[in-house]
Amino acid sequence: MKDIDLAALQIACRNLARGALWSEQGTPEIAVAELAGAFMRIASAQAADVIEFGRDPNITTRAIRYLTYTHVAPIGIDTKWWFTEMLTCLLELAVPSMIQAPESSAFLIDVQEGIAQSMDPGAG
């Protein structure tokens, strides 16, 4: 099994923190470092869960990069809570922890279709 690339995980957490704290007046580096550290602690715990399922822990880093590119932390919401919930959801899709019922697995077909469109814009 692969080891987690901690440097890449740190960079991903820092980039997301910078985006979450972005301001036209500038983004204080101390605040970015503090939030990135919190993200790193959360992501490391989630990566440990990914390892328990026998998967590549670098999925965690890729999920954070996806969040950075695709989602913005909502203003007025605890950013660490938002990050935990979003990362948990993404990792559940990539590394499922349970078998789905027919009613809930129907959504996974929707996700497959959305992924196909996202990766090949001409496919939709």
Image: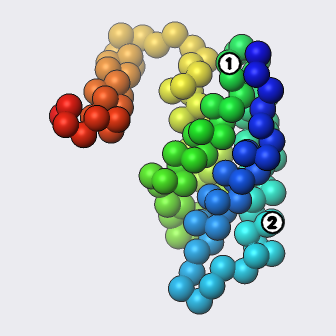
Q: Looking at the image, is mark 1 or mark 2 nearer the viewer?
A: 1
Image quadrant where one finds the N terminus: top right
Residue at image position (59%, 22%) is 95
Q: Position of residue 70 (x, y in %)?
A: 45, 52
Q: Where is residue 71 in the image (x, y as percent from the top left)?
A: 47, 55
Position of 113 with respect to 49 (left or right) is left
State the separation of the CA atoms marked 1 and 2: 29 Å
Whether 32 is drawn above or below 44: the answer is below
Pick the front one: 22 or 96: 22
Pick the front one: 42 or 60: 60
Whether 17 is drawn above or below 96: the answer is below
- Locate residue 63: give its quadrant: top right
In the picture of the structure, the residue carrying the numbered disc 1 is 55
Q: Residues within 10 Å of mark 1 (few under 14, many from 20)?
A: some
Q: Where is residue 42 in the image (x, y as percent from the top left)?
A: 75, 45
Position of 27 with respect to 123 (left or right) is right
Image quadrant where one finds the C terminus: top left
Pick the front one: 19 or 101: 19
Whether 50 is drawn above or below 23: the answer is above
- Locate residue 98: give its quadrant: top right
What's the coloring here? Answer: rainbow
Question: Visible in this render: residue 114?
Answer: no
Circle 1: residue type = Arg
Position of 27 with respect to 104 (left or right) is right
Q: Where is residue 86 in the image (x, y as percent from the top left)?
A: 56, 44
In the picture of the structure, the residue carrying the numbered disc 2 is 34
Circle 2: residue type = Glu
Q: Determine whether the residue tagged by mark 1 lies in a helix, strand or loop.
A: loop
Residue at image position (68%, 18%) is 55
Q: How many marks?
A: 2
